[in-house]
Amino acid sequence: MGLLSLTCAAQASSLRCGSQLISVGDRAFEGQQKCGVPVSQDVIGSKETFNSTYRRSEEVRVEEWIYGPDHGMYQYLRFEGGRLVRIESQRQR
């Protein structure tokens, strides 16, 4: 009989860290200043984006930071090119 792992995930546009709030669009250093050092911080790859200011494609680093658990919830933050692009909360049972 296999082991079943259930997860429940939700996306948000901001995350409260104590009395501070980080939001999609914030810089990575702001996230670390407000939330502290994550329990896990990995470079998960790169992504090609188009820079409209300079009208050229550029490759940016993609990172995933994990905070928690806080009351059983983990917070997954995705940064692309040093900017927060996604916040996902996930509870694992």
Image (tube, rainbow, N blue to C red):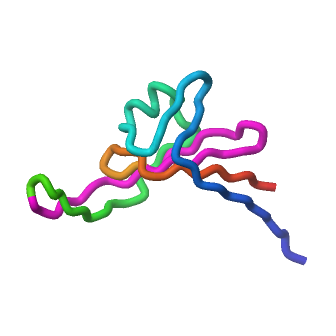
- Dividing the picture into quarters, in which one does residue 15 lie? top right
Q: If the image is split into quadrants, where does the N terminus sit?
A: bottom right
Image point 58% across, 29% down: which residue?
17
Q: Is residue 80 left or right of residue 4?
A: left
Give percent across and percent down for residue 45: 37, 60
Q: How many marks?
A: 0
Q: Is residue 37 above or below residue 85?
A: above
Query: Could you tell me residue 6's position as x and y percent?
Result: 79, 64
Specify the farthest residue to the right: 1
Residue at image point 57% right, 44% down: 66
Foreground pick, 53 / 49: 53
Percent x, y for residue 20? 54, 25
The segment highlighted magenta reads: 55-78
Look at the picture and state if 4 lies above or below 55.
below
Does 70 lie within the magenta span?
yes
Q: Is residue 52 shown left or right of residue 69?
A: left
Q: Can you name the residue that lies furthest to the top here? A: 19
Residue at point 31% right, 63% down?
Answer: 47
**Magenta highlight on residue 63:** yes
Q: Is residue 80 left or right of residue 7?
A: left
- Indicate the quadrant containing the C terminus: top left, top right, bottom left or bottom right: bottom right
What secondary structure predominates along the stretch shown in magenta?
strand
Q: Is residue 30 above or below residue 80?
A: above
Q: Residue at x 48, y 52 (%)?
A: 86
Taking depth in this image into account, of 64 and 13 the one nearest to the observer is 13
Residue 46 percent location from the top left of the image? 32, 60
